[in-house]
Amino acid sequence: MNGGFIETVYGKIPFGELVMDSLPDAPYSDFPNIFSKENKYKERLPLNINPKLAYFAGYFFGDGGLKDINKTYLKTKRFEYKIKIADEFFLQISFIQKLFVELFGKCPPIRSAKQERMFYIDPTCKSVYLFLTRIFELPAGPKANNIRVPVIIKNSGQEIKKWFVRGVFDADGDTRAVERGFKSQPRVKLRMKSKIFIYEMKDMLSENFGVSVNGPYPDKLTNSVYIQVERHADIISLAAQKLFFHPIKRWRLEKTCFMLSKKHNLAIA
């Protein structure tokens, strides 16, 4: 993008400084499809776990949701297989929309809830809904506080695990906003409702990205728990390993690391 700025609640970011990378197709490993190739839904579903699907799943664990089909049946006598994925920024939800097309062959429109500063897609698709519940073990309804890292991710190689972690952090992770200048006490944080899941994410982040992770700590105000990376060398390492693909979060982390590298005379690989 050329010229102009994107506005956040903390200031402005030049469009030209934002990076929107594509996700790789490899490595991947096949898994048994839950539907036959001639399934009655006549819709495309992934046949393997690859970086794109792992990232999408991770993002969904953070900012995705499945409508409670049992509640809709009680009200309307039919199951409504609605999926919703949201983000504060149009750039990111546009990226998720394109990823949804690549994975599932459908292009749901982007909608907005201006009063909440949110953009989202909310397709109704039974095959994708069931795919997410069966392959990634998501509850068929609101995400419970005891969601777990799915077995298919735990049994995958390191690269797939890293893409799942990136998806989770792009959804629910953050780093300090630096639109108006460098912030003291920088950190990379992940906050979620599920204590079980946050412990698993702590292990995955530490083991696969090679950084020291503090927490979990309780946050009584939001009824959640969080972990965070605080060591400056580890924050720089996360930037070098591209923990964030979300363009706004990535920009913030890279700006933070630029200042840290100057302060400590360290290089960002």
Image: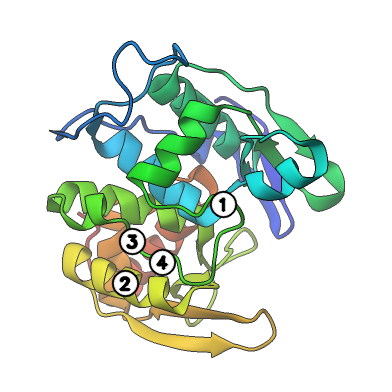
Q: Could you tell which of marks 4 and 1 lies nearer the N-terminus?
A: 1
Q: Could you tell which of marks 2 and 1 lies nearer the N-terminus?
A: 1
Counting from the top left corner in percent of width and height, residue 7 is at: 72, 46
Counting from the top left corner in percent of width and height, residue 133 is at: 44, 45
Q: Amino acid at mark 1?
A: Asp
Whether the residues at callouts 2 and 3 have beta carbons within 8 Å, the answer is yes
Q: Rounded to the nearest whole Å, what is the CA distance between mark 2 and mark 1? A: 18 Å
Which quadrant would the N terminus be assigned to in this image?
top right
Please name the residue that numbered disc 4 is placed on: 259
Q: Is residue 216 above or below residue 124?
A: below
Packing grade of label 4 (10 A; few <14, some 14-19, many >=20) is: some
Please name the residue that numbered disc 3 is placed on: 149
Q: Rounded to the nearest whole Å, what is the CA distance between mark 2 and mark 4? A: 31 Å
Comparing 204 with 106, the one in front is 106
Comparing 2 with 227, the one in front is 227
Please name the residue that numbered disc 1 is placed on: 63
Q: Would residue 241 be visible to someone looking at this image?
A: no
Which residue occupies 44% across, 34% down?
20
Counting from the top left corner in percent of width and height, residue 238 is at: 30, 62
Q: Rounded to the nearest whole Å, what is the CA distance between mark 3 and mark 4? A: 34 Å
Whether the residues at callouts 2 and 4 have beta carbons within 8 Å, the answer is no
Left or right: 224 in relation to 49: right
Q: Could you tell which of marks 2 and 4 lies nearer the N-terminus?
A: 2
Please name the residue that numbered disc 2 is placed on: 200
SS for dot 2: helix
Packing grade of label 2 (10 A; few <14, some 14-19, many >=20) is: some
